[in-house]
């Protein structure tokens, strides 16, 4: 490698910067622009990652390195039991200064900081985002409360996306009210994508199964894109679903995990697909405005939470942050995460169906994440850090900058009102309205489903924390009208469910 020292500029390519067009190496002489890739089993063992997540990441990285090699880039590819810092330190002794586009993950930035401060690596600006930091700071600020609408409107104005003469197309910025319909089986959903598995995919699946045999889930790379062509195929499939995406964005179904959603977040978070490419492609379809707006809002939400995570140093600058728990915990929720979240049956069809999806392929769309998984964890007072770690491990599109704000700031109320004006929680009626889960459940949503008991028990336990919160005034008024007998039933249901799940026992109908 020493023969490259004076002639080649070397870039370390983290696992989530797998793009040929948007990073510095896109515009440099390829023969003199070397790319470094590191497969670190230390990183792989740092959490109990889903096998599908490990396989997806490794196969995309291997395919990308082969693509880069075919384009003429010199390649250094390391497989190691060491961390990234140790390998890059060793390489510095051989090839000199190594450039790195600033990593998206705080964890990786933190690991590489000593090398950066020693002048062994150089951080460069990350151009893989749709939005600029000053847009966020000028519209939202660097201190809570953080509110999405101000940032979203700023982005629309700056980019001109879905704008006309300085005003939003359709006369308003949000079409959320048109995007809350349950799905009853019509229109039909598309057949899920199935990708051709190649030699690299098979090698990666064998490696994951042999090196991480006790990790959760299974790996099946026919379900996710790993080559550039497959990632583009995934985008095209998502665009075919886009016309119906908006109307049924909030719907959930046991008949279709996807409905009209897609796994595009996996490709975008690895930067296999740039967010600019994705939104430009969407705007070139003839999808209805409510679908385009809802789709674009999801992309901007991703940018929004990344800004929040960085300006608060992963919430560490906030008063509500608990150093001992390495997470905020506004409601002081400290029950351990039950094995239900790893696939042990709970008895609730909604929860078990969604967990089955996660264990099967490390994915479900964002409404089951919020209104089933996070909802149950909230109502059971599960520790927010434990829940966040589970999401980080179990989901193929989860990285610290996106999973921590989504779970700590929205999925739970552990930040208080720093990101959300109220907790996102629900009882049985919402789940019954927006899904078909209740139809196949042993609990009758109108007679004996205890999710609503959990809801009211949660409000009762935390009512003091919600005093003065206008958005919680109606639930608190309804709680005050609830009889002592019903409140006792709520409390007993909460205690029974928590006890059963803590013992990995199914919840059964109570007489």
Image (tube, rainbow, N blue to C red):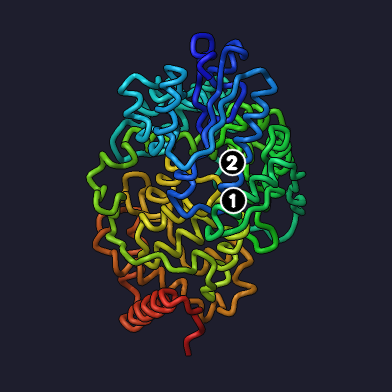
Task: Determine crowd level at label 2: few under 14, some 14-19, many 20+ residues with C-alpha closer than 10 A.
Answer: many
Of callouts 1 and 2, the N-terminal one: 2
23 left or right of 474 in image: right
SS for callout 2:
helix
Expressed as whole percent of the image width and height from the top left, the position of residue 394 reads 51, 54
Q: Nearer the viewer, residue 142 or 338?
A: 338
Quadrant of the rendered image containing residue 110: top left
Q: Can I make out residue 180 in this image?
A: no
Q: Quadrant of residue 3?
A: top right
**Which residue is painted at 56% across and 36% down in the image?**
270
At 51% from the left and 84% from the top, the residue drawn is 509
Left or right, 489 with respect to 153, comes to left
- The residue depicted at 46 percent of the width and 44 percent of the height is 43
Rendered position, 268 above or below 215 = above
Would residue 241 be found to the left or right of residue 155 on screen?
right
Q: Give the camera-side residue of 327 and 475.
A: 327
**Residue 246's disc number:** none
Q: Which is nearer the eye, 158 or 80?
A: 80
Q: Is residue 23 above or below residue 359?
A: above
Left or right, residue 484 beside residue 81: left
Q: Which mark is residue 58?
A: 2
**Mark 1 vs 2: CB contact within 8 A:** yes
Density class for disc 1 (Cα within 10 Å; few <14, some 14-19, many ≥20) is many
Q: Position of residue 314 (x, y in %)?
A: 34, 40
The residue sitting at the front extreme is 2
* Residue name at image x 42 percent, y 51 percent: 407
Relative image position of residue 145 (x, y in whole percent): 31, 40
Please state the horizontal and vertical placement of residue 213, each as a whole percent of the image. 56, 58
Q: CA distance from mark 1 to mark 2?
A: 9 Å
Per the image, the residue denoted by label 1 is: 208
- Secondary element under disc 1, as helix, strand or loop, is helix
């Amino acid at each position: 490698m020493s023969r490259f020292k004076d002639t080649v500029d070397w870039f370390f390519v983290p696992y989530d910067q797998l793009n040929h067009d948007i990073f510095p190496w896109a515009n440099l002489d390829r023969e003199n622009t070397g790319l470094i890739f590191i497969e670190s089993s230390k990183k792989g063992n740092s959490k109990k990652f889903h096998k599908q997540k490990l396989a997806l990441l490794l196969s995309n990285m291997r395919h990308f390195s082969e693509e880069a090699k075919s384009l003429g880039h010199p390649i250094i590819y390391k497989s190691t039991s060491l961390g990234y810092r140790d390998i890059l330190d060793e390489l510095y002794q051989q090839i000199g200064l190594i450039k790195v586009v600033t990593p998206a993950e705080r964890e990786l930035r933190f690991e590489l900081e000593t090398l950066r401060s020693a002048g062994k690596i150089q951080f460069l600006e990350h151009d893989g985002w749709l939005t600029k930091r000053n847009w966020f700071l000028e519209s939202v600020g660097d201190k809570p409360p953080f509110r999405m609408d101000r940032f979203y409107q700023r982005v629309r104005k700056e980019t001109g996306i879905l704008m006309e003469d300085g005003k939003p197309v359709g006369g308003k910025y949000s079409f959320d009210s048109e995007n809350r319909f349950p799905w009853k089986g019509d229109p039909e959903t598309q057949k899920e994508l199935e990708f051709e598995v190649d030699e690299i995919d098979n090698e990666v699946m064998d490696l994951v199964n042999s090196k991480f045999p006790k990790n959760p889930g299974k790996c099946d790379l026919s379900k996710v894109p790993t080559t550039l062509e497959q990632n583009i195929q995934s985008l095209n499939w998502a665009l075919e679903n886009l016309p119906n995406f908006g109307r049924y964005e909030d719907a959930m179904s046991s008949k279709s995990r996807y409905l009209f959603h897609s796994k595009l977040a996996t490709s975008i978070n690895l930067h296999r697909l740039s967010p600019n490419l994705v939104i430009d492609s969407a705007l070139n379809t003839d999808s209805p405005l409510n679908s385009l707006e809802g789709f674009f809002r999801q992309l901007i939400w991703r940018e929004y939470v990344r800004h929040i995570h960085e300006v608060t140093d992963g919430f560490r600058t906030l008063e509500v942050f608990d150093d001992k728990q390495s997470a905020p915990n506004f409601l002081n929720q400290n029950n351990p995460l039950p094995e239900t979240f790893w696939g042990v049956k709970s008895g609730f069809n909604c929860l078990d169906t969604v967990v089955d999806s996660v264990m099967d392929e490390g994915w479900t769309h964002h409404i089951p994440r919020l209104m089933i998984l996070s909802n149950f964890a909230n109502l059971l007072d599960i520790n927010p850090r434990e829940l966040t770690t589970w999401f980080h491990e179990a989901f193929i599109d989860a990285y610290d900058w996106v999973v921590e704000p989504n779970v700590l700031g929205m999925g739970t109320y552990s930040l208080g009102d720093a990101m959300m004006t109220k907790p996102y929680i629900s009882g049985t009626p919402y789940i019954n309205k927006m899904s078909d889960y209740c139809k196949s459940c042993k609990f009758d949503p109108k007679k004996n489903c205890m999710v609503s008991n959990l809801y009211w028990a949660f409000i009762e336990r935390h009512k003091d924390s919600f005093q003065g919160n206008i958005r919680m005034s109606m639930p608190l008024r309804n709680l005050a009208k609830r009889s002592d007998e019903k409140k006792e039933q709520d409390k007993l249901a909460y205690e029974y469910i928590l006890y059963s799940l803590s013992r990995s026992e199914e919840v059964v109908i109570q007489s």
